[in-house]
Amino acid sequence: MAAANKGNKPRVRSIRFAAGHDAEGSQSHVHFDEKLHDSVVMVTQESESSFLVKVGFLKILHRYEITFTLPPVRRLSKDIREAPVPSLHLRLLSVVPVPEGYSVKCEYSAHKEGVLKEEMLLACEGGSAYVRVMVQARVMDRHHGTPMLLDGVKCVGAELEYDSEHSDWHGFD
């Protein structure tokens, strides 16, 4: 064990309390800067016709309703619909023009864990112009707790999970 310690100096760490707080922890709340409370869905414009929407942490095998605002786009008019190339895990529910641009509501199904990106194309009625919206989510497995959802993300249901331990099948005779 002594060989593992490379130096003779012991490591010393200290904790400092702000004025007015005693060491007993009567004020035991953790406070963060307001800059860290950026808990909204982030929309980033990647090009004139492409957006990246970051929705934060989600839990596997759950469905979420995601609402975000796209800035005004010249390529889109008031009559917007989803292009005929749908995604299996991302479904457009509504697009409503608002003064800030377009309020988009969609449903996302977290089908596997990891950093996932699902794409949907928005198009004008009768027009050939498309806007690509890429939704990025960090999906946690079921053993890592419950994520704190960002503003604009709401869990609307859980998928049934298949677990082979609960099967009635006893195998071949």
Image: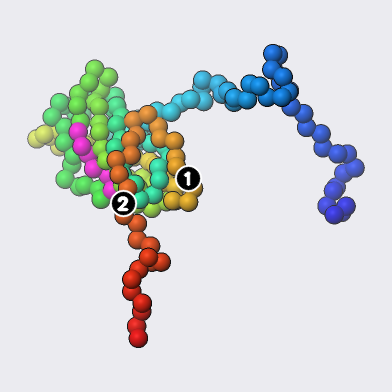
The mark nearer the N terminus, 1 or 2, is 1
Residue 85 left/right relative to 69: left
Reading the image, the residue beneath label 1 is 145
Q: Within 10 angstroms of label 1, few (less than 14), some, or many (20 or more) residues?
A: few
Question: How far, Cα to Cα, is label 1 from label 2?
Answer: 16 Å
For the C terminus, the quadrant is bottom left
In terms of image quadrants, where is residue 15?
top right
Image spot of residue 97 (x, y percent): 20, 23
Which of the pair 129/7 is nearer the observer? Answer: 7
Q: Within 10 angstroms of label 2, few (less than 14), some, or many (20 or more) residues?
A: few
Applied colour scheme:
rainbow
In terms of image quadrants, where is residue 121?
top left
Is residue 55 located in the magenta-colored stretch of the structure?
no
- Residue at 23% x, 43% y is 91
Reading the image, the residue beneath label 2 is 159
Residue that sits furthest to the top in the current view: 20
**Type of amino acid under label 2:** Glu
Can you see residue 170? Answer: yes
Can you see residue 132? Answer: no
Q: Is residue 110 above or below residue 97?
A: below
Residue 74 left/right relative to 29: left
Say whether marks 1 and 2 touch (CB < 8 Å).
no
**Type of amino acid under label 1:** Gly
Is residue 93 located in the magenta-colored stretch of the structure?
yes
For the N terminus, the quadrant is bottom right
Stretch of the chain drawn in magenta: 89-94
Which of the pair 131/30 is nearer the observer? Answer: 30
